[in-house]
Image (cartoon, rainbow, N blue to C red):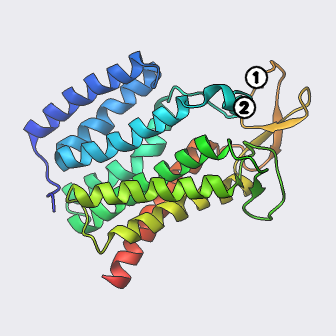
Amino acid sequence: MTEVQVSTANLLIGFGLAAVAAGVAWRLGMLSVNGWYAAIPLGGLTYGLGGLPAAILLLAFFASSSLLSRAFARAKRQVSANFAKGGRRDWAQVVANGGVAVFSLVMAATGWVATPFAWVAFAAALAAVTADTWATEIGVLSAGQPFLITSGKRVPPGTSGGISFLGSGVALLGALLISALAWSLGLITFTVLPFVGLAGLLGSFIDSALGATVQAVYWCPQCKKETERYPVHYCGHSTTLYRGWRWLDNDWVNFLSSLAAALIAIGLFIWFV
């Protein structure tokens, strides 16, 4: 298992590599300018504290998610217009998706958390955001109408809290891919692999549950539909709060669901291993 430790040389190398990789992602339209800036410390700390295996796992999430965001763009155009943000990830999305994972390494490097727990949390947090992103990007292509995770009510594609069988299956694949990659890189043991995959899937369901209940969702009176966009819908008309807590946007939901996945994985690790 890779040790989590502070190395000045690795931190300098990590920040340099992160700046280059984030710059390439910006040029390819995957990151906004402030997303580039936010990715540098996150990527630098990941490599600096966890080494190349940790950086590979983080890149696996980001690369796969960015590619899926661009895939089938024409088919997803109408649904994606209701999402709060586009395909370019800004600083809040970068922190929301990678913050819990990186913080687990910081906790281990400072001695607050044992290394095995840190790697379980790191992998599970990335498994959750991967599962959620994959489900969002592919689930909207489902032939059947999605349903709310809380009530089973049929809702239009792209509705916050809506899930589908296709999206759930893809979420499971994403979570298992990250957990299997974490095992192959020596970050977790084979015994822990299914716990990380399960925690990642549950994290994506928690994301949907929050989206269906307390996430801020707005209403466009012009289009007569729900949207995550505020203060203006894509049609140009102002939107008003329809349900949920105004401060709890999709970035906060992503962060909280990845945190929940990390805690679930640690709990399973303590209970069964």
User: In the rendered view, would you say 215 is above or below 26?
Assistant: below
Q: Identify which residue is drawn at 41% across, 75% down.
A: 267
Q: Secondary structure at mark 2?
A: loop
State left or right for residue 269 relative to residue 129.
Answer: left
Residue 241 location (% of width, % of height): 81, 40
Q: Secondary structure at mark 1?
A: loop
Q: Amino acid at mark 1?
A: Tyr
- Counting other residues with Cα less than 10 Å from the Cα at mark 2, is it few (<14), some (14-19), or many (20 or more)? many
- Residue closest to the far top: 27
**Marks 2 & 1, CB-CB < 8 Å contact:** yes
State left or right for residue 44 relative to residue 205.
Answer: left
- Residue closest to the far front: 143
Residue position for label 1: 234
Q: Identify which residue is drawn at 24% across, 58% down.
A: 184
Q: Quadrant of the N terminus?
A: bottom left
Q: Amino acid at mark 2?
A: Arg
Residue 73 location (% of width, % of height): 61, 27
State left or right for residue 8 relative to residue 92.
Answer: left
Q: Quadrant of the C terminus?
A: bottom left
Would you identify the image quadrant in which residue 216 lies? top right
In-front residue for pair 160/250: 160
- Tell me the CA gap for discs 2 and 1: 8 Å
Residue position for label 2: 229
